[in-house]
Amino acid sequence: MTFENILCETKNAIAYLTINRPKVLNALNTATMEELRAAFHAIRHDPSIRVVLLTGAGEKAFVAGADIGELARQDPVSAKEYTLRGQSVLNLIENLGKPVVACINGFALGGGCEMAMAATLRLASENAKLGQPEVKLGIIPGYGGSQRLPRLVGKGIALQLLLSGEMITAQEAYRIGLVNEVVAFPELIPRAEAIARQIIANSPLAVQYILEAVNRGMETPLAQGLYLEAALFSVICASEDKNEGTRAFLEKRPPQFKGR
């Protein structure tokens, strides 16, 4: 699959997906979003890929935001379609069924911060800056920022960031729980790869069901979430991976999971 605005390669069960528009700080336009949609659909259906590392080209930006020129042309009708299309791509990332690690290598602003929040995990380099500055443009977030940010950091902190449009450091993002870890820039991808290898060693089905249990359970009352967990637990107990995992533990050997 050939793309103009993104790069995608696979090695050792890891897909490396890079937004490749460094001259505009990897800003998201419609063409880039549609390429991301196609790439993630392909990744979802490729059983050889277990984890995705998502980053931006260059050393300045993960994604500095939306393409402002394209955004300025939106009218009320097209704007709704514009946001719904973007939200659907981020929903695909969030519910891929495989972990997506956002490797935030610089600015992650507006749509870039929203994309990072849709990922499973967020690692930030020490030079990263994050924020939702839409209010400074006279608009509001359109790719889920008003919804995912308070779920990650709490209502009060989210509102402070959304209403002020403040850009925060990687260290502050870690303090408030917006990113999982902060590492030196050269260690960003190696650290993400180390986490990916830990995940890949586990059952693909268990990873998939944990993602589903957490993502769906977060949107339901506790009782419904617990019921969902029980349902998924019962299904996975019929899997070959469950039999292999428990047998390997009892036999004191590494498991050989097949994703079945």
Image: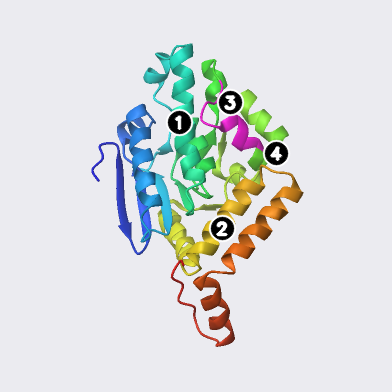
Placement of 25 over or under 11, stated as above or below: above
Mark 4 residue type = Gly
Camera-nearest label, 1 or 3: 1
- Residue 51 in the figure: left or right of residue 168: left
Is 141 colored magenta in this rendering? yes
Q: Can residue 232 be spotted in the picture?
A: yes
Question: Quick one: SS at disc 2?
Answer: helix
Identity of the residue furthest to the right in this view: 223
Ranked by sequence position, the earlier of labels 3 and 2 is: 3
Look at the picture and state if 251 lies above or below 203: below
Which residue is painted at 39% across and 45% down in the image?
A: 40
Earlier sequence position, callout 3 versus callout 4: 4
List x then y, in percent, for residue 210: 58, 57
The segment highlighted magenta reads 140-150
Give the residue drawn at x 63%, y 64%: 234
Q: Which residue is mark 4?
A: 154
Q: Which residue was labeled with disc 2?
A: 209
Displayed quadrant of residue 56: top left
Q: Is residue 245 above or below residue 86?
A: below
In this orientation, which residue lies closer to the viewer: 107 or 97?
A: 97
- Whole-angstrom CA distance, mark 1 to mark 3, is 21 Å
Q: Which residue position is annotated with label 1?
A: 86
Instruction: Work out how far the residue at label 3 is from the one at label 4, CA to CA, in angstroms.
Output: 16 Å
- The kind of secondary structure element at disc 3 is loop
Q: Residue 61, which numbered label?
A: none
In front: label 4 or label 2: 2
Please name the residue shown 42% across and 52% down the image. Answer: 53
